[in-house]
Structure formats: C-alpha cells, structure tokens
Amino acid sequence: RKVDSPHALAGSLEKPRYYRFDRRVARHSRQVLERLMLASDFIEHRYFERVDCHALASIAGMSKCHFVRVYKQAIGQSPYQHLIRRRASAALNLMGVTLQPTLAIACAVGFESTSSLSKALKKFSAKGIPKLIY
C-alpha cells in the first residue's frame, strides 16, 4: 500500500484518548465505595483535627490523585470541600449553643482563624454568617 504523506499513518497510531469520567455514569465497585466511606467517616468524626489528603488517601488505600478524583465522582464534592463544610456546620452549631468567643469556636472545629471561619461560612453555609461573629 502506498502512503501519500508521512502524516497519513499518524491517525491510526495516535495514543488512545483517556476516558473522561462522568459522576452520573461512573460505576465504582463496592470495595472502592466502602474505602471512600471510610475516608468520609474519618472526616465526619475527626474534622476538628488536622486532616490532609495524603492521610485520607492512605485510609482509602489509594494514591492521592486517584483518591481525590474518585471521591469527587462518588460523593459529589472534593474531600477538602467536605471537610470545610463539616467544620462550618459544626461551628454554626456551636455558635447556637455557646457564648464562647468566635476565635475559640474556630479553633475548636479546626479553623486556624476567625477569618477562615468567616470565609467558610460565607461560602458553604445556607444561613450565611450569624450576627454573633465579632
């Protein structure tokens, strides 16, 4: 067979394109979902501690990049977003039941400052920032 140009065969020798995962279509095995739920439970029960993505990935038994991608597909939000939402929710609950200063509440739920707590409440809370922040 005669080839007209050197680029004529390039179409047949291209590297395969990687499949782009869609959360609605992606199917995960039961074992992967169980490992993701272990990481999710870790966030739910230990949100006030210093939590990093490497620790969560090791709990799930995955590499960091793979863990973040699969977690976002299965849960619908990244592990970091889940952590910040959980901390903001806990801070709102504490603000409703205690008269502690905002800095104490922020530190109790894992934020480093009141400004980081304020940003999280603005971004993730449906109620917004309560008037108690000072």
Image (cartoon, rainbow, N blue to C red):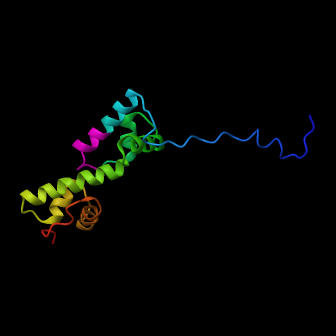
Res. 16 image quadrant? top right
Q: Check if residue 76 falls in the magenta segment.
A: no
Q: Residue at x 31, y 49 (%)?
A: 82
Tell me if 112 is positioned left or right of 62 in this view: left
Locate residue 88, reporting x and y percent: 23, 56
Q: Say if 72 sits above or below 111 in the image.
A: above
Q: Say if 91 sits above or below 114 in the image.
A: above
Locate residue 83, reporting x and y percent: 29, 50
Res. 33 image quadrant? top left
Tell me if 105 is positioned left or right of 37 in this view: left
Task: Kindly give the residue lying farthest to the right in the view shown.
Answer: 2
- Magenta span covers which residues? 40-50
Task: Kindly give the residue lying farthest to the bottom in the view shown.
Answer: 134
Q: Say if 11 sits above or below 61 in the image.
A: below
Locate residue 28, reporting x and y percent: 42, 32
Q: Residue at x 38, y 49 (%)?
A: 78
Quadrant containing the N terminus is: top right
Q: Check if residue 46 falls in the magenta segment.
A: yes
Quadrant containing the C terminus is: bottom left
Q: Residue at x 12, y 68 (%)?
A: 132
Q: Residue at x 21, y 65 (%)?
A: 128
**Number of numbered callouts drawn:** 0
Q: Between 57 and 7, which is closer to the camera in this rendering? A: 7
Locate residue 22, reporting x and y percent: 47, 43
Q: Between 95 and 77, which is closer to the camera in this rendering? A: 77
